[in-house]
């Protein structure tokens, strides 16, 4: 990496220069560089609005960059060990849809883990690609899904020699990575494109104590949420491309279908600035984050009733639990005789701590480049307090173990989505084919996708989440489901 070059921020610098010329705005946006007063300007001030420019001369075009955006994307590619990058303003959600649309034609096959984010299912609907789902390894004790075994992926490729692409999650929401390098070698031997959902892995390339990034492992294309772990603004993500298995121009074409023609230059500049910070100082910043996480694990593991996953959760002998992202705190709380959902709520209500998510037995706390020791100590103290309240205070309550059982896919997601449907109560839908997606948020993994036969297990899972008051997202009102007529 060329450190001198990485000191530049072409896009941010161009916008800054434009703002400094104090132009008279007769273009959109209508706030005219902040010449308005609203409740929002009361909160944020007017300065930020000056940078919210649309397409002034000299600022380049996101969809056909030849100037400062082109330059900024090239720097991003270099910093993330890719050949090309594309800035995204609608999160990895849009990146995943672009990867699928840009690599697959209708009826071409793609192998995916069943615990994919909903954007992958939407990618299947818009592209018409045919999913070959493989099961991840479930840790039913913790109630989480991990990676997919190498043998499972290989078997799926061998059984579907005509498959075009393979989709991996690197890492999962819980920080677990599969043996990606070996998988990529196996896939490339079969001429299969490997695409990665790195929504949670954007930081990994900057520190070799962390698992391999998709680009380091040799993947062809990856979408990463810099906003989640690298400090850019929410919604700002990037696509990375390596080698020539993926048609870069076709991916760009897919982008023009999804992306707004008025992209936020504040989001785009935040990518430029974050890339510079990480390229120049990422290694040492992440060394601190890792040390902080290790400190938290050490302290939290001493508290009665809770335990935290560490690197020992993964091993080089286990291809689906191969490497662990040491910036995540997956905290097991059932020893407090409380569910993860209860602890998640109590943390917010009584300790003013916002966790990332809850599952039956665990809560997830994410550390990232902005985390401080003071924050980590607050978390440790809150758990000490919860432990003194709940550990051994009640008769041990058995918390039901969550098991994932997904339905069998009977028709393609696209076919199911576009077929005639009827609305019926969810509880009475056993044996029907769903024509909608039902998702629990967070973590945003569909429990039902269009084209799947609804099983008793799925109905039970739905009931479970309804009872635990997780957020259920579906087209129909909660309790009902659209099924194929
Ligand atoms: C595994 C996974 N993939 C993709 C996404 C989508 O990323 P984004 O929020 O950047 O659109 C998420 C979001 O939480 C996610 O958890």
Image (cartoon, rainbow, N blue to C red):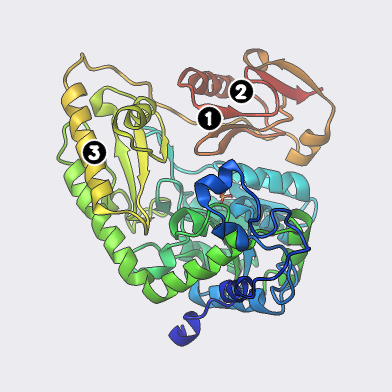
Secondary structure state at the residue bearing disc 2: loop
Instruction: Please report the residue visible at 18 percent of the width from the left and 48 percent of the height from the top.
Output: 298
Query: Can you see residue 5?
Result: yes
Look at the image and tell me in which quarter the C terminus lies.
top right
Q: Estimate the x, y position of residue 194 in percent, counting from the top left.
A: 60, 62
Q: Estimate the x, y position of residue 68 in percent, counting from the top left.
A: 65, 77
N-terminal of the two: label 3 or label 2?
3
Residues at marks 1 and 2 touching, judged by CB atoms closer than 8 Å: yes
Residue wearing tag 2: 455
In this rendering, the answer to whether 259 lies above or below 362 is: below
Secondary structure state at the residue bearing disc 3: strand
In this rendering, the answer to whether 277 lies above or below 462 is: below
For the residues labelled 1 and 3, the Cα–Cα distance comes to 26 Å
Q: Estimate the x, y position of residue 362 in percent, counting from the top left.
A: 35, 34
In this rendering, the answer to whether 61 lies above or below 461 is: below
For the residues labelled 1 and 2, the Cα–Cα distance comes to 8 Å
Q: How many residues crowd mark 2 within 10 Å: few (<14), some (14–19), many (20+)?
A: some
Q: Is 457 in front, or is 102?
A: 102
Q: Is 381 in front, or is 219?
A: 381
Residue wearing tag 1: 405
In the image: residue 232, left or right of residue 430: left
Q: How many residues crowd mark 1 within 10 Å: few (<14), some (14–19), many (20+)?
A: some
Q: How many residues crowd mark 3 within 10 Å: few (<14), some (14–19), many (20+)?
A: many
Instruction: Please report the residue visible at 82 percent of the width from the left and 35 percent of the height from the top.
Output: 418
Secondary structure state at the residue bearing disc 1: loop
In the image: residue 117, left or right of residue 250: left
Residue 307 circle label = 3
Residue 170 circle label = none
Which callout, 3 or 2, points to the residue nearer the camera? 3
């Amino acid at each position: 990496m060329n450190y001198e070059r990485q000191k530049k921020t072409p896009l941010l610098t161009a916008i800054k220069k434009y703002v400094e010329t104090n132009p008279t705005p007769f273009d959109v946006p209508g706030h005219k560089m902040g010449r308005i007063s609203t409740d929002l300007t009361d909160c944020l001030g007017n300065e930020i609005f000056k940078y919210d420019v649309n397409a002034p001369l000299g600022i380049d075009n996101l969809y056909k960059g030849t100037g400062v955006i082109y330059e900024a994307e090239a720097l991003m590619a270099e910093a993330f060990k890719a050949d090309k990058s594309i800035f995204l303003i609608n999160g990895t959600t849009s990146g995943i849809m672009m990867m699928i649309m840009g690599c697959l034609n209708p009826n071409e096959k793609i192998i995916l883990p069943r615990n994919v984010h909903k954007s992958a299912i939407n990618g299947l609907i818009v592209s018409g690609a045919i999913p070959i789902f493989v099961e991840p390894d479930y840790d039913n004790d913790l109630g989480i899904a991990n990676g997919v075994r190498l043998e499972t992926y290989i078997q799926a490729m061998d059984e579907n020699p005509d498959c075009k692409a393979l989709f991996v999650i690197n890492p999962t929401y819980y920080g677990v990575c599969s043996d990606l390098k070996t998988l990529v070698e196996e896939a490339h031997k079969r001429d299969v494109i490997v695409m990665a959902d790195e929504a949670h892995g954007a930081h990994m390339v900057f520190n070799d104590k962390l698992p391999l990034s998709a680009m380091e492992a040799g993947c062809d294309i990856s979408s990463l949420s810099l906003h989640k772990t690298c400090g850019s603004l929410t919604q700002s993500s990037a696509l990375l491309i390596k080698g020539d298995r993926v048609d870069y121009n076709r991916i760009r074409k897919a982008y023009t279908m999804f992306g707004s023609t008025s992209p936020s230059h504040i989001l785009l500049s935040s990518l430029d600035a974050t890339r510079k910070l990480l390229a120049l100082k990422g290694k040492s910043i992440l060394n601190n984050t890792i040390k902080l996480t290790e400190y938290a694990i050490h302290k939290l593991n001493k508290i009665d009733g809770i335990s935290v996953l560490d690197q020992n959760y993964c091993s080089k002998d286990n291809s689906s639990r191969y490497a662990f992202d040491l910036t995540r705190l997956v905290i097991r709380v059932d020893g407090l005789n409380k569910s993860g959902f209860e602890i998640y709520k109590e943390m917010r209500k009584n300790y003013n701590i916002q966790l990332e998510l809850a599952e039956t037995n665990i809560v997830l706390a994410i550390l990232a480049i902005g985390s401080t020791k003071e924050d980590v100590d607050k978390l440790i103290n809150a758990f000490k307090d919860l432990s003194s309240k709940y550990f051994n205070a009640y008769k041990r309550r058995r918390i039901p173990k969550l098991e994932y059982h997904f339905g069998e896919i009977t028709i393609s997601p696209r076919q199911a989505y576009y077929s005639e449907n009827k609305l019926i109560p969810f509880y009475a839908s056993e044996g029907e084919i769903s024509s909608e997606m039902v998702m629990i948020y967070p973590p945003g993994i569909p429990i039902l996708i269009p084209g799947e036969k609804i099983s008793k297990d799925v109905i039970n899972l739905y009931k479970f989440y309804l009872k635990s008051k997780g957020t259920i997202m579906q087209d129909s009102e909660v309790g009902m489901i659209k099924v194929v007529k």
